[in-house]
Image (tube, rainbow, N blue to C red):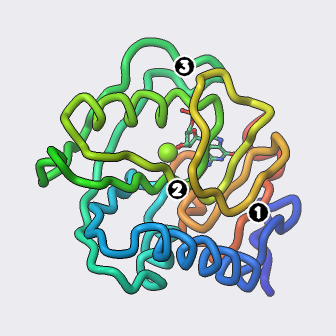
Amino acid sequence: MNMHPDCERIMLTEDQLRARVREVAEKVDKDYDGKRPLVVGILKGSIIFYADFIRFLTMPVELDFMAVSSYGSGAVSSGKLNIKKDLDRDVKGRDVIIVEDIIDSGFTLANLKALLTERGAASVSIATLLNKAERREYGVAPDYNCFDIENEFVIGYGLDYNEQYRHLPYIGILKRSVYEK
Ligand code: 5GP
Ligand code: MG
């Protein structure tokens, strides 16, 4: 596989991603048997995971998206979540599955889960591609997670650095020289 020159190394290959996303999606499919969940993708980081994930689901699903940001990109998120694009659908009474690229401090997902619960969702679960468990500061955990990873800055498969690298088909560790210059 051709590795982008800004990558230190490939952490997860396309094959590893496909196999594990399938495994997790099949578990979700079983758990939601008989239901019709609203699958909420968090833009933009989740797009590739989301697209792969939903194609392994056999139950009827409805798709929707949100875009959120927390001010500042440092280790400590402060303030409330900023909703840049809200859902099209009403979540009242719905079983919601939030699909997110990565859970780090947990700020984003703790706030999103609280928001959708407050809006009257029947249930809210969280599916993440990556989990940096050691970085958690907020009391939230994914119900479904594909990979636990070390505290490294990763890119690709939807994840960016300054809006670059999202299209890389693998998860790579970004070279420090790229963001430390
Ligand atoms: P949290 O709110 O859990 O602290 O942060 C979640 C968000 O931080 C993710 O949605 C993502 O945008 C960003 N993030 C955290 N770690 C990484 C990483 O290693 N690479 C990239 N590209 N984004 C990250
Ligand atoms: Mg994100």
Q: Which image quadrant for residue 137?
A: top right
Q: Tell me the residue at 61%/74% (across/down).
A: 21
Where residue 157 sits: x, y (%)?
59, 68
- Depth check, mark 1 against mark 2: the one in front is 2
| Left or right of residue 96, residue 50 in this image | right
Whether the residues at callouts 1 and 2 have beta carbons within 8 Å, the answer is no
> Residue type at mark 2?
Ala
Q: Is residue 181 visible?
A: no
Cα distance, mark 1 to mark 2? 20 Å
Query: Can you tell me whether the CB of the residue at mark 3 lies under 8 Å from the nearest atom of ligand 1?
Result: yes
Lower position in the chain sequence, tag 1 or tag 2: 2
Lower position in the chain sequence, tag 1 or tag 3: 3
Q: Nearer the viewer, residue 159 or 65?
A: 65
Query: Can you tell me whether the CB of the residue at mark 1 lies under 8 Å from the nearest atom of ligand 1?
Result: no
Q: Which residue position holds label 3?
A: 77
- Depth check, mark 1 against mark 3: the one in front is 3
Where residue 25 sits: x, y (%)?
53, 74
Callout 1: 10 Å neighbours few (<14), some, many (20+)?
A: many
Q: Which residue position holds label 2?
A: 127
- Mark carried by residue 172: 1
